[in-house]
Image: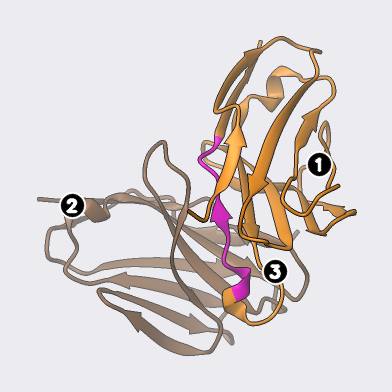
Amino acid sequence: QKEVEQNSGPLSVPEGAIASLNCTYSDRGSQSFFWYRQYSGKSPELIMFIYSNGDKEDGRFTAQLNKASQYVSLLIRDSQPSDSATYLCAARAGGFKTIFGAGTRLFVKA
Amino acid sequence: EAQVTQNPRYLITVTGKKLTVTCSQNMNHEYMSWYRQDPGLGLRQIYYSMNVEVTDKGDVPEGYKVSRKEKRNFPLILESPSPNQTSLYFCASSFGTGGSGANVLTFGAGSRLTVL
């Protein structure tokens, strides 16, 4: 069974701090990795995707990928209360299935 | 507006009464997929489709059927619903081929189904 694992949290950080979300995946054939944000009662929406080793930055968000360690992370700088949500990590292999982790709940305290 | 539309958004039904959840996208996406979301289990893939008349099972296909007769539509059919199919269902689509960005999923608003 191909898996994507995340710490369910909740992860609580103060406003303005850096939130660090982590994810591991079991399928070494995975090629693309995604971070989605899901507010309570809403559908997931894409934050970032990454497919090359290293860092990818977009505004306050940085995704990091280490294929050798099968590890993906998302850093949120200057965290805001509006960042409070569940963050879903997903991996897609060469086939056509996207596997999601169970998500990490993030609380940003004002 | 580019979107994935699901209907109904909310449904309460009884065991054994066949139902269909519709999904339609207006982005000319080739790839469409159904997920169910349950507390603590995250999003689990039910079925997906790479193109018209091409479908395949995801991780939890039991009790579900799908069809892809047109590119824009991908209905989810529960022939004989049971209480363990009570869940939040999401339809999603993507371009599906090409670069990694083509695999980004656009989700519908979700359909909350309760089977009594």
The residue singled out by tag 3 in the image is: B96
The answer to which image quadrant residue B46 occupies is: top right
Q: Which residues are magenta?
A: B102-110
Q: Is residue B60 above or below residue A1?
A: above
* Residue B59, horizontal then vertical, whole percent: 76, 49
Query: Observer-nearest residue: B11 or A65?
Result: B11
Dot 3: within a 10 Å radius of its alpha carbon, few (fewer than 14), some, or many (20 or more) residues? many
Q: Which residue is mark 2?
A: A81
Rendered location of residue A24, percent (x, y): 54, 69
Distance from disc 3 to disc 2, alpha carbons, whole Å, reads 34 Å
The residue positioned 83% from the left and 19% from the top of the image is B80
Whether labels 2 and 1 belong to a single chain: the reply is no
Looking at the image, the residue that sits furthest to the right is B53
Q: Amino acid at mark 3?
A: Gly
Name the kind of residue labelled 2 in the image: Pro
Q: Which residue is mark 1?
A: B61
* Image color mode: by chain
Q: Which chain is brown?
A: A
Residue at image coords 80%, 18%:
B18
Are the numbered discs 3 and 1 placed on the same chain, yes or no?
yes
